[in-house]
Amino acid sequence: MLPELVTFEHFFATALRDPDAEDGLAGRPEFAVYRNTVASGAIEALRSSFPTIALLIGGEAFGRLAFDYQHAEPPASPVLAFYGDTFPDFVAGQSWLEELPYLADVARIDRMRSEAHVAADADAFAFTDLDRISSYDWMTLRIRLHPACRYRWFRTPATSIWLAHAEGEPDGMIEPEWQAEGALVTRPNGVVSTIRIGRAERRLLLGMWLGDTIGEAASAVATVYPEADISAAFALLISSGALLAPEERD
């Protein structure tokens, strides 16, 4: 790349980030229009990617939040579908949102859904796959997570709060029990889905992410959570589309 072009790109990026930069660009009217267009695009991209946060705090407050974020971390790529990966952590650091301690976790669910939406396609494990797997092979099988699968464990009832707002503003007040819970995001049949999961499902998912066999993952759950219904937990993961279809064995 030519040195002059590198210098120009540096000045251009600096001017986007700092309206007061003295680099010969920031003060030009046509550049101000471009910078405002970039900012508006970034804010609208955030509003599209984090609709539940906008619903919870209101459009005006979300606009302020998104404006501050895009000023602190402007888009690094023109593909705004991937913008906002650090937005949940940014939300967690805002002192004026401290009265909503679950908000950053709800933002993480919104982000998980955005990632699942653009993840690679692949066949999911189905109940019919069990028909050709013996009991022994099942326990020694290693199943990977589907590319669109995202899961996370929260110390807040963020999943319950997200689900209560999935169809828009709920009719009345919601009062979820304040307890830790998990969220599983998948994309069965091409449609992104979010469900609440418990500790057993979370541990099974972790085991399969680590490369455990089904037997090893089940044993770990039974050791840590002896009261868990492991069969029901597996059934939930299969029905949700969280698991990748097994490869054919020779």
Image: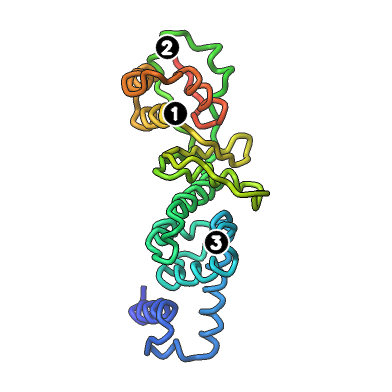
Measure the alpha-carbon separation of dots 2 and 1: 21 Å
Q: Residue furthest right?
A: 171
Q: Earlier in the sequence, mark 2 or mark 3?
A: 3
Q: Residue furthest top?
A: 135
Amino acid type, callout 2 = Asp
Q: Nearer the viewer, residue 135 or 159?
A: 159
Instruction: Report which residue position mark 3 lands on.
Output: 57
Q: Residues within 10 Å of mark 3 (few under 14, many from 20)?
A: some
Q: Which residue appears at 54% of the width and 79% of the height?
A: 36
Left or right: where does residue 9 sit relative to residue 232? left
Measure the alpha-carbon separation of dots 3 and 1: 31 Å
Amino acid type, callout 1 = Glu
Label 3, secondary structure: give it: helix
Q: Which residue appears at 40% of the width and 61% of the height?
A: 90
Left or right: where does residue 3 sit relative to residue 74? left
Report x, y in % for residue 2: 36, 77
Amino acid type, callout 3 = Ile
Colour scheme employed for the rendering of this structure: rainbow
Q: Earlier in the sequence, mark 3 or mark 1?
A: 3
Instruction: Report which residue position mark 1 lands on.
Output: 201
